[in-house]
Amino acid sequence: MIQVTESTQRGIQLTENALKQVLFLQDRQGKDLYLRVGVRQGGCSGMSYMMDFTDSSSIGEQDDVFDYEGFKIVCDRKSLLYLYGLVLDYSDAMIGGGFQFTNPNATQSCGCGKSFNV
């Protein structure tokens, strides 16, 4: 079972492993950045997950911000319609490692887990 670090009141959840990894990656950037999570059209199942670091100047009124012990995740409200309840995990396994998305809204996912359909 996936262990979530904070309250289930947030639209996007982070496991401890995912939080450690994004903090590590943020530190390598050398800046106080937010993690932007969203969706876009494409991928083998119809919609693809996207994530990237962004600075506070790109946060707009259409965005929701979730705080995790000082680290912030940003998601635009349109993407949040598809991602609400998403659990972001991280594994350092040699096969199948990396960030993993568990999306309760997905009715279909591709084999690699990077795209989905609702």
Image: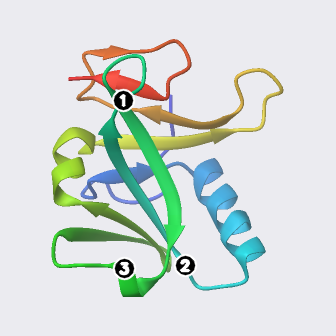
Of labels 1 and 3, earlier in sequence is 1
Camera-side mark, 1 or 3: 1
Q: Please, what secondary structure does the residue beneath circle 1 have?
A: loop
Question: Badge 2: how crowded within 10 Å, few (<14), some, or many (20+)?
Answer: some
Q: CA distance from mark 2 to mark 3?
A: 11 Å
Give the residue at the far front of this rendering: 42
Q: Position of residue 51 (x, y in %)?
A: 49, 53
Residue underneath mark 2: 33
Q: 115 or 101, which lies in front?
A: 115
N-term mark: 1 or 2:
2
Quarter placement of the C terminus: top left
Identify the residue position indicated by label 3 in the image.
Answer: 58
Residue 14: image location, x then y, percent:
48, 52
Residue pictured at 39% horizontal, 51% vertical: 13
Residue 63 image label: none
Give the quarter of the image for residue 20: bottom right
Residue behind mark 1: 42
Which three-letter amino acid code belongs to the residue tagged 3?
Ser
Going 70% across and 64% down the picture, which residue do you hit?
25
When asked about the image quadrant of residue 93, the answer is top right
